[in-house]
């Protein structure tokens, strides 16, 4: 399911639950519409949480991608400016005793 579908489902279930609860409390004064409305609202909670989790994950992936691209660009700019140098693995020693082993 897409995030928009989950958000729409959540909104519809919540609106239906609030309407049913309102009718049961203020119009018919019976318990069945109130219980049905609360059941609809409780049904909307998992869909709302799933929509929120999908949106958060999408933002996190997008931010991670943007940060990685920015890091690549910064590395390329540093390399072009000569700031980025690789350390040499060669060991040079001025001590003649060490080289004669």
Image (spheres, rainbow, N blue to C red):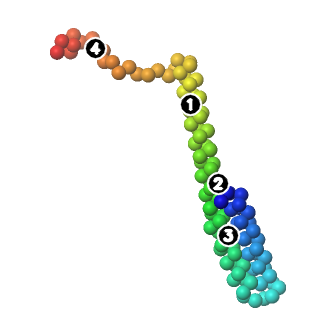
Measure how far apart labels 1 and 4 are at the Cα level.
35 Å
User: Badge 2 is on which residue?
Assistant: 55
Mark 4 and mark 2 residues within 8 Å of each other at the beta carbon: no
Q: In the rendering, which numbered label is found on residue 72?
A: 1
- Measured from the top left, where is residue 40 in percent x and y? 69, 75
Question: In this figure, which residue is indicated by the disc labeled 3?
Answer: 44
- Position of the N terminus, as image quadrant, is bottom right
- Label 2 – label 1 distance at C-alpha: 26 Å
Residue for point 65% across, 68% down? 45
In terms of secondary structure, where does tag 4 sit?
A: loop
Residue 22: x and y, percent? 78, 79
> What residue is drawn where x is 78% and y is 76%?
19
The image shows residue 84, relative to residue 38, as above or below, that is: above
Does dot 3 land on a helix, a strand or a loop? helix
User: Residue at label 4?
Assistant: 93
- Crowdedness near tag 3: few (<14), some (14–19) or many (≥20) residues, C-alpha within 10 Å: many
Q: Is residue 16 left or right of residue 2?
A: right
First in sequence, mark 2 or 3: give its number.
Answer: 3
Residue at image location 72% in from the left, 87% down from the top:
32
């Amino acid at each position: 399911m897409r995030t928009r579908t989950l958000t729409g489902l959540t909104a519809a279930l919540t609106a239906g639950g609030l309407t049913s609860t309102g009718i049961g409390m203020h119009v018919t004064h019976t318990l069945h519409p109130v219980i049905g409305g609360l059941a609809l609202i409780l049904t909307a909670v998992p869909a709302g949480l799933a929509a929120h989790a999908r949106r958060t994950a999408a933002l996190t992936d997008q931010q991670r991608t943007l940060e990685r691209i920015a890091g690549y660009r910064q590395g390329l700019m540093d390399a072009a400016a000569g700031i980025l140098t690789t350390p040499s693995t060669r060991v040079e020693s001025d001590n003649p005793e060490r080289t004669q082993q």
